[in-house]
Amino acid sequence: MKRSLLLGVRRGYALLIPFLAIAAAAGVAACQGCKVPETGAVSADADTTAVAPTVRLYVLSTVAGALEPCGCTKDQLGGIDHLAALIEGQRDEAPNRLVVGAGPLLFTDPEVKPERSSQDAWKAEAMALAAKEIGLAAWAPGENDWALGADALARYQEQAGAAALAGNLEGTKGVVVRDVAGVKVGLVGASDPKGRTGAYPEGVKAGPAIEAMKAGIAEAKKQGARVFVGLTALPRGEALRIADSVPELHVLVLGKPSERGDGNDGQKPPVMIGSTLVVEAPNHLQAVAVVDLFVRGGSDGPLVFADAGGVARAEELISLSARIRELEIRLNGWEGDKRVSAKDVADRKADLEKLRAEKAKLEAAETKVTGSFFRYNLVEVREKLGADKDVAAQLLAYYKRVNAHNKEAFADRVPEPAAKGEASYIGIDACTNCHDEERKVFDGTAHARAYATLQQDFKEYNLDCVSCHVTGYGKPGGSTVTHNASLQNVQCEECHGPGSLHAKDPEKKGLIVLSPPPESCVTQCHHPPHVEGFDPMAKMQLILGPGHGRD
């Protein structure tokens, strides 16, 4: 994505470091000449399908460092390389666009553990560079974005080429104005990045969000803006009060003020508060909200956008999306399960296609309106969108960098020894001395290739990844990110427990878990968001065989 993502929008060269000072002249992006097609305002009686949108907004909420999904479910939601491919693939249908966000962007959690400082800093850098590739214009930062301090956040802004907007935070820029195909768009931000204890990141002082949003709108108007987009990293109720209090906003983007962990949220329907469209996309890049704005008529007077499709049907579309995802997960889970009949698979695939067709028909439906209007759509970010080669290359560089660093940095990290009288892990080769039949079964399972899936992607030393691909990770007498040679892959002892005492006295009862409950897998690794719709009873059948659960 080396070309500008915003044809006709002048590239910003100002290095946006809002925590140091507010540069008044940096509110309007500097100019570099790119000719654009005449696709902006159209006459009030024009066909709503006749032209490209005046402005397309790609809306992200609470990305929180989610470069790509982690897990073994087929076609997982997420991946910034897939999002980049979507945006690039829609260049011709929407040449004039802005990418905006709200909520934490750079880090998964508000705090960074010392052992993870290098990896998490480089991950945030990879996110910033990817944000630049997709053309992120601005976002309202959340608590997580200050995880390494204000100076680090300023550097990430510079790398992203995007503004962190929060006019209610002391010393922080609150507004930028972008010229999109002759229509000036004001982006105004507010944030309340306080943590669980009510404390703010060091050096951050917050004021009232509503007043800051009003002041930002006034400043955007002075700079000639006619379209106003609010970006908020606030509790949802407080953000909705902004829509009530600042009716000039055409679109209000919601994100969380803080995020913790990698759990995925469900979809939230867009709502209209007065004439303001309120949008919150699912976290972790599961989906992107697409808002097409069509400016009709002349250039005088305030704009009001009518809903020409999307909002009125949003809840029905969310319901259909959930049913589609449920069927997809079920069909993915049936792969390799010989107990499921071919007829059942075919019937469910037919059901899936019917639901997809119903959803596509609903999405394509339009409402006839007069004057300026908008269309809303939520697009799931999936593998089928493809991967942008430039962003994919950045991700690969990040993984290689982390792999090389962690291999050396944690070279001396050895597992804590097992307590006296307690069992330690001995590895599958030791188990094979007595369990040859079981070993043959194991070698035919995906568990036997778990570590190789990391190695092929340069992730075997990645602290985000390794724990579910080795045995006894972080446990006494077990493995670490670097010391796991005999415990690579998901071996016997991951389910049956450490086997040193059992190996010494095979006849003594109680030294090993003979029949692990299937649910034990769920507590370890096979849980959302890494695995969706995991059926432990069904999946158990894939690792059983002669001598291993079957006679």
Image: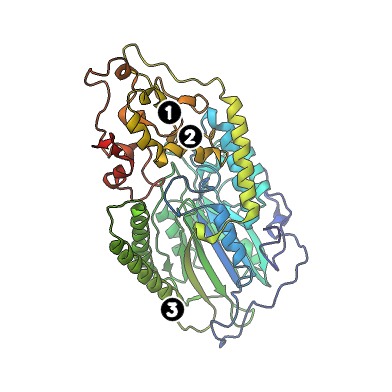
Instruction: Answer few, some or many: residues within 10 Å of disc 3's Cα (few below 14, many 20 plus, some between 14 and 19).
Output: few
Provide the residue designation for mark 1: 473
The span from disc 2 to disc 1 (Cα, nearest Å) is: 8 Å
Q: 394 or 330, which lies in front?
A: 330
Instruction: Answer few, some or many: residues within 10 Å of disc 2's Cα (few below 14, many 20 plus, some between 14 and 19).
Output: many
On screen, residue 127 versus residue 422, left or right, reads right
Q: 116 or 172, which lies in front?
A: 116
- Is residue 484 shown to the viewer in this render? no
- Residue shown at 34%/23% (left/top)? 498
Quadrant assignment for the N terminus: bottom right
Provide the residue designation for mark 2: 466
Quadrant assignment for the C terminus: top left
Q: Earlier in the sequence, mark 2 or mark 3?
A: 3
Q: Earlier in the sequence, mark 2 or mark 1?
A: 2
Q: Position of residue 303 (x, y in %)?
A: 56, 75
Callout 2 touching callout 1 (CB < 8 Å): yes
Identify the secondary structure beneath mark 1. Answer: loop
Q: Position of residue 188 (x, y in %)?
A: 58, 58
Q: 41 or 321, which lies in front?
A: 321
Q: 221 or 182, which lies in front?
A: 182
Callout 3 touching callout 1 (CB < 8 Å): no
User: Image height check: is 295 above or below 265?
Assistant: below
Q: What amino acid is found at the position of numbered circle 1 in the picture?
A: Tyr
Provide the residue designation for mark 3: 365
Please name which of the two marks, 3 or 1, marks the residue nearer to the observer.
1
- Residue shown at 49%/39% (left/top)? 110
The span from disc 2 to disc 3 (Cα, nearest Å) is: 46 Å
- Residue shown at 28%/37% (left/top)? 546
Q: Earlier in the sequence, mark 3 or mark 1?
A: 3
